[in-house]
Amino acid sequence: NAGVTQTPKFRVLKTGQSMTLQCAQDMNHEYMSWYRQDPGMGLRLIHYSVGAGITDQGEVPNGYNVSRSTTEDFPLRLLSAAPSQTSVYFCASSPTVSNQPQHFGDGTRLSIL
Amino acid sequence: GDSVTQMEGPVTLSEEAFLTINCTYTATGYPSLFWYVQYPGEGLQLLLKATKADDKGSNKGFEATYRKETTSFHLEKGSVQVSDSAVYFCALSEDNTGNQFYFGTGTSLTVIP
């Protein structure tokens, strides 16, 4: 069972570069989300999606774009990387059946120089 | 709006000590409550859950009881082990049309032999 798969696991970027963090789930979950985790800050919601074709902003959306063209995939795009975006990024998914837990990927550790 | 307030850390305990990590919540409806655990370098894993008032979730010796009257979901374990060293997150989920999940800021636990 693959669950939620995130790629890459590690990446180093230079300021101003762009990249896409990939997230795929094989559980047919409707709800998907992206978080960033920084020391002392817990998890902060970047963007989420309640189904294919539907996305919305979370707590810290600036500098990030998302799209949801399929149920399985929910990529996160950094348009012009900044050092403040150095973080660990987690993708998560859950069914839309109410009050079900989220399943998390293993994370992408991103450093912006 | 919904929120989760979690006991500040870090917490350091000796092996076989009793653990309590406090968690209180604010919700508009009738949420489900969760505890997640994050081991170093890994993603979040569901530890236990409770879906209605007075439910007790349990797993791996950990327990938490959903207390609607005090809006709390405190995590307890009678005898911690070194292998329990991790970060613990309290979370809630509501069946909303928007964002459905709210996390506490996490509590770091270190168990020393």
Image (tube, coloured by chain):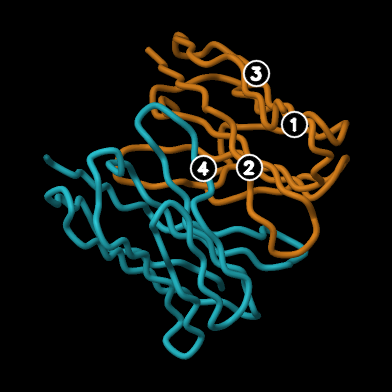
Among numbered discs 3 and 1, the one appearing first in the sequence: 3
Q: Secondary structure at mark 2?
A: strand
Locate residue B109, reporting x and y percent.
25, 48
Q: Chain of mark 4?
A: B
Locate residue B51, reporting x and y percent.
63, 71
Say few, some or many: other residues with alpha carbon within 10 Å of mark 4 (under 14 / 14 to 19 / 20 or more).
Answer: some
Q: Are marks 3 and 2 in contact (CB under 8 Å)?
A: no
Locate residue B110, reporting x and y percent.
20, 44
Q: Are marks 2 and 4 in contact (CB under 8 Å)?
A: no
Which residue shows up at 11% across the image and 40% down it? Answer: B113
Location of residue B82 with respect to A84 vertically, above or below: below
Q: Chain of mark 3?
A: A
Say few, some or many: other residues with alpha carbon within 10 Å of mark 2 (under 14 / 14 to 19 / 20 or more).
Answer: many
Q: Are marks 2 and 4 on the same chain?
A: no
Q: Secondary structure at mark 3?
A: strand
Mark 4 or 3, which is nearer the eye?
A: 4
Residue type at tag 3: Thr
Q: Which residue is mark 1?
A: A25
Q: Which residue is mark 2?
A: A103
Name the colour assigned to chain B in the rendering. Answer: cyan
Q: Chain of mark 1?
A: A
Q: Which residue is mark 3?
A: A20
Is A104 left, or right, of A84 in this rendering? right
Q: Which residue is mark 4?
A: B45
Q: Are marks 4 and 3 on the same chain?
A: no
Q: Chain of mark 2?
A: A
Among numbered discs 2 and 1, the one appearing first in the sequence: 1
Name the colour assigned to chain A in the rendering. Answer: orange
Q: Quadrant of the N terminus of chain A?
A: top right
